[in-house]
Image (cartoon, coloured by chain):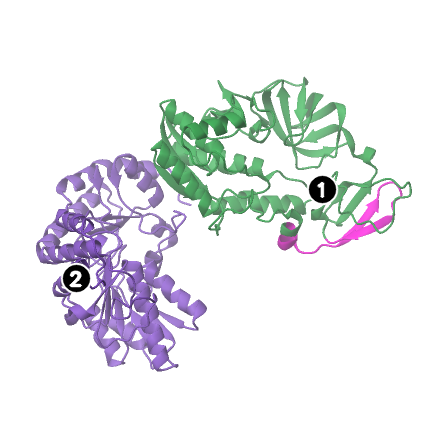
Amino acid sequence: MAYLDHAASTPMLPEAVAAVSAGMAEPGNASSLHRAGRRARRTVEESREAVAAALGARPSEVLFTGGGTESDNLAVKGIFWARRAADPRRTRILASAVEHHAVLDAVEWLVAHEGASVTWLEVDPLGRVHPGVLEAALGDDVAVATVMWANNEVGTVQPIAELAQVAHAAGVPLHTDAVQAVGQLPVDFAASGVDALTITGHKFGGPFGAGALLLGRDVACTPLLHGGGQERDVRSGTFDTPALAGLAVATTLATQRQPETALRLAGLRDDLVRRVFAAIPDAVYNGDPVHRLPGNAHFSFPGCEGDSLLLLLDARGIEVSTGSACSSGVARPSHVLVAMAQDEEQARSSLRFSLGHNSTVADVEALLDALPAVVERARRVPVQ
Amino acid sequence: MKLLAALSGGVDSAVAAALAVEAGHEVTAVHLALSEAPAALRSGARGCCSREDARDAARVADVLGIPFYVWDLAEQFKVEVIDQFVAAYAAGQTPNPCLRCNEKIKFEAVLDRALRLGFDAVVTGHHATLADGVLSRSVDAAKDQSYVLAVLTPEQLSRTVLPLGAMTKNEVRAFARARGLGVADKADSHDICFIADGDTAGFLRSQLGDQPGPVIDALTGAVVGHHDGAYAFTVGQRRGLDLSVPAADGRPRYVLSVEPVSSTVTVGPVEALDVAQVITAPPVWSSARSLPLRCEVQLRAHGMVHGCTVTADGQGWSIALDTPARGLAPGQAAVLYDGSTVLGSATVLAAA
């Protein structure tokens, strides 16, 4: 058995499990004024401070949300609405062509329903957005720009600080989806210069359904959810005290351990890549070899369908991903690989191996024990 | 054996997979995504391709504890089934898309892929019996699907497992309930899955456009009406003719033939629908016999059975019926039976 799909979700850290479990036994709504409420509120605010400290933000810049999708929607739609309200000419959105669907579909919804237009920022064949591409796309009519910190499929890391500088020179706020970055790369909100930054717990050892949008104090953002105004009046909903405690513990530990985790995972990953090439010499390594998540290895196996590889590896206890799936579970050619100028057949033949905090050399060995026979078998299925 | 179970999200395929698991086979489930834009929810009795059906199929696999995947065959389904369906109507034929889907999708594309991936066979929830390579009718005559499986070659049948042949539909549902399968009481699907509202003529019109032409009385040769598209008519049809000139003998008129090139629909009295001789395309023998042959023939799904004598006609069959069949359209399948045993299937080319 080997779990090589940490980019989809990584196991919770035992310390985070303990924090969530302990919190679930405690009564009290953190908005209540009595003793139980005050105790819960203290947990929430200490969690906020911990997340802020771990990610280079001020506590008031941490808005807790239900996860990455909500944070991305809140940033893209909320900043769009607020910027357009301040100046009705601002109706254009800049977004990289390799964004996660939580960003892509939010942008497309604004285009379909809110009179927005979009300029997709092209990427190079390694998946990078060049600052010059962003610069050329900027203008007075731009409401918001959004470029992910690191890509969930091919692992390419974007030059976020440079992009933020370029955007700011034109007076445009930049949002970044950093869901894949926390715990694998150093993430410092203030130093990066971005205006809004998405994180979600279950990608770095925290619980599902708990995330945050880091939002600069001077960045206007129209709410998606209206109600009690718990999160700076930008997000409403009763505080999920136990989950936030778990999120805080995971954020703290994942960022503390990030340097050694990254070093260890990059070593494992490089070993994995070498052994894949030794076993399957015509494999194609996708993404940026240098600016890359340490836990990500992404290949195309010519002549194979990713679906077939996944099924055959799963049957042998090796859990991997083809990268993208729509809600009916039907695999489509990845928009990320298509944006990186790969043809559809190569895009369909791809497989993502992603390592995380508890990955070991045994996982890599289990994969390589199975992979040659699986690739040989999958090549018998004609690629559609 | 290593079996691949095709789960539609309905009760039959669920129970077939469950029986395969209980028989000790190593079973992997797939749901076939056949629609390019699946609806979120099922509507009515149609369709097996909504995302709700995919979820139902996934839940069955959960309960059975077997792996589950979705295979996207929407493109092949469009080319092999939907486009063929439209083309057949455009050529004045009456195709059976379910039969075509079995032939080209379930037991060709899926079976081929399964074998290449290392599976020994596919298991499906069709109501038919398959033992020692011999295909025969289900014990449940009302649900029997041997007619639409008769296109399978002996090679395909040797790689197929049909666990439901000895069970009635009620027994299938009871089994599903007893095993805690949530689809136990799910409505049967029928009609054509890719025509969401059941309006076949409207679907064909959207694909083929208006093709107006005359309606001609076979007895008098007179033009007795007009239509917007010959594809909306099928041999034996009585309703919807909308004739402007009443028949001279005052009796109802039926569609006798559809001629697409001149877009002519010919109508006539009911007895003109009777045919005694059927000519077919080259057959698929599931259980080969030598000709001439005395046996029975079934000419449509759930249709009646006629005693017949089959002789060779070129590469195809010439089938002399003991009793006339009424309203036979080119494009339908003639399936030969010996008692309940399926012998083979061939597409009807002409009838007289």
Q: Is residue A31 visible?
A: yes
Q: Quadrant of residue B259?
A: top right
Label 1 residue SS: loop
User: Where is residue A322 shown, x and y percent of the image?
Assistant: 31, 48
Residue behind mark 2: A38
Q: Are marks 2 and 1 in contact (CB under 8 Å)?
A: no
Image vertical order of residue A179 relative to residue A279, above or below: below
Q: Amino acid at mark 1?
A: Thr
Label 2 residue SS: helix
User: Where is residue B6 shown, x and y percent of the image?
Assistant: 44, 35
Q: Quadrant of residue A152?
A: bottom left
Image vertical order of residue B147 relative to residue A304, above or below: above
**Magenta segment range?**
B204-228
Residue at the image point whose x is 76% and y is 44% from the top: B239
Residue behind mark 1: B234
Q: Which chain, by letter, is purple? A: A
> Chain for mark 1?
B
Image vertical order of residue B162 relative to residue B264, above or below: above
Q: Give the crowd class for mark 1: few <14, some 14-19, many >=20 residues within 10 Å.
A: many
Q: Quadrant of the N terminus of chain B?
A: top left
Is residue B148 magenta-colored?
no
Is residue B215 magenta-colored?
yes
User: Where is residue A196 shown, x and y percent of the image?
Assistant: 24, 69
Report whether B39 appears left or right of A122: right
Q: Amino acid at mark 2?
A: Arg
Mark 2 and mark 1, same subunit? no
Q: Which chain, by letter, is green? A: B
Q: Quadrant of residue B273?
A: top right
Residue at the image point whose x is 20% and y is 70% from the top: A61
Q: Is residue A382 visible?
A: no
